[in-house]
Amino acid sequence: MTGPAGPDAALEQGTRNAERIAHHDAALASLAAALAELGATVDAIQGTITGQDDVLRTVDGLKDTVDELLHRVGALFPDGDTGGAFYKPIPAPRFWQLAGPGREEAIGRLRSWVRDVYQPAFGHLAAKLPACWEQHTFCLTALDVASELHAVLYLQATRNQGLLAGQAELLTRLMPALAALMAAEAARCPHASSHARPGANGGRPGDRGTALPAFTPGPDGRG
């Protein structure tokens, strides 16, 4: 049996072609949807990569900072030995609370610092120290700050620009101010009539013959 011929055959062929075209259109639409989904996925991945680049740049910057700090530490400690290189201030004596042996021990340490460091190093400023300074809580407090600040600035393994600037500040501004304040504190005290310049040990008149140990900065000779 033969198929239709003439116009019928052409109509049948057109129908089949239309079905094929519709099928291809559906396939193309599906492919377009898949491509769109793939494009969205690629965009998301690209955003993640960009974010990771930002993180990596931050990490690189942190690495540079750490390297710079290590370089500075290496400059301060060429041998890599930081043990005992920095002076650590002692706990602050609470002179407004101290009494008995504890107070005497704290005053004795300041007395030795006045004798061994303050008087030799600060000349006319140390000469302003009242003879009765041990009887003034303010003077004790000021000398404690002065002695520890001096140790922090001078008992270091190395000296850099910042430390040098701190030493200049101590010599030209802080110590003169503390000396003037301590002198003013004792200028009109009840025992002003018995004032006398401290002797070699920087203590009270009755303590001038007392032997004192050499000043030791910090507990266990730290620094």
Image: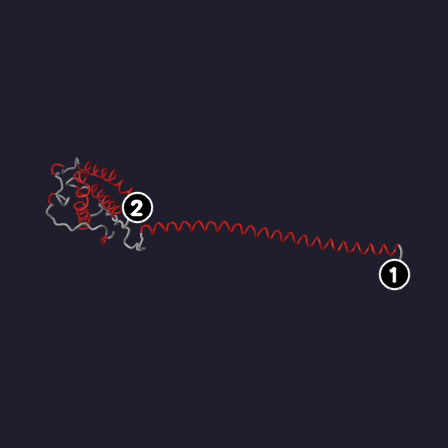
Identity of the residue drawn at 83% across and 56% down: 13
Q: Amino acid at mark 2?
A: Asn
The image shows residue 48 at horizontal and vertical percentages of 54, 52
Q: Amino acid at mark 1?
A: Gly
Alpha carbon of mark 2 to alpha carbon of mark 1: how far? 106 Å
Foreground mark, 2 or 1, reads 2
Residue 112 got which mark? Answer: none
Snapshot quadrant of residue 119 = top left
Helix, strand or loop for disc 2: loop
Helix, strand or loop for disc 1: loop
Q: Do the residues bearing badges 2 and 1 touch, measured as CB atoms within 8 Å?
A: no
Q: Is residue 47 left or right of residue 3?
A: left
Answer above or below: position of 113 versus 27.
Answer: above
The residue beneath circle 2 is 160
Depth order, front residue of 115/77: 77
Q: Earlier in the sequence, mark 2 or mark 1?
A: 1
In which quadrant will I find the N terminus? bottom right
Q: Is residue 14 left or right of residue 61?
A: right
Answer above or below: position of 72 versus 179.
Answer: below
Tell me the colour scheme of the image.
secondary structure
The image shows residue 133 at horizontal and vertical percentages of 17, 41
Q: Is residue 28 left or right of residue 12?
A: left
The residue beneath circle 1 is 3
